[in-house]
Amino acid sequence: MTKEGIYSEIYSIIRNIPAGKVASYGMIASIHGGCTARMVGYALSKSSSDMKLPWHRVINSQGKISLGDEESKILQRNMLEAEGVVFHNDKIDLKIFGWKILA
């Protein structure tokens, strides 16, 4: 499969994360089954704003925002808080706010 095809599948998974829930890069990679957490992050960095992708619902496995610049971190946190996600010491409790997939 092409890189673009894998990215498209990653974006489809991310579009299914419900409001008020988050998923880690690794969780998305695990659901996909053919990519790594790093590939998920790279796919997100290549996405465009016109894709209507809920990118803000993807965080790291520690429950933290992984974006590099402060402005983007603030934006992501504000978007998550607007959906009811709560932060404690800059972390999200994945047991409460983690996306649970029914097998």
Image (tube, grey):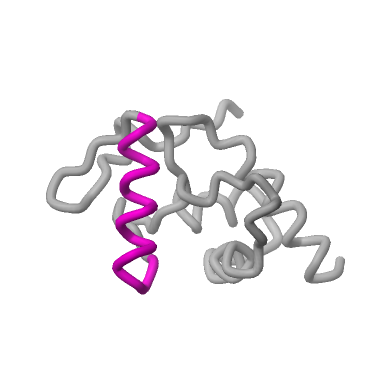
Q: Is residue 93 above or below residue 2?
A: above
Q: Position of residue 75 (x, y in %)?
A: 37, 53
Which quadrant of the figure contains the C terminus? Answer: top right
* Residue nearest the observer in this picture, 61 or 79: 79
Please state which of residues 35 and 13 is positioned toward the viewer in this rendering: 13
Occupied quadrant, residue 88: top left
Q: From the image, which quarter does the N terminus lie in? A: bottom right
Which residue is painted at 24% across and 36% down in the image? 86
Residue found at the far right of this picture: 1
* Quadrant housing residue 38: bottom right
Any magenta on residue 96? no
Q: Is residue 13 left or right of residue 28?
A: right
Please give the name of the residue rendered at 13% of the width and 51% of the height, measured from the top-left corner: 89
Q: How many marks?
A: 0
Looking at the image, residue 23 lies above or below residue 37: above
- Residue 84 position in % (x across, y down): 32, 29
- Which segment did they paint magenta? 67-83
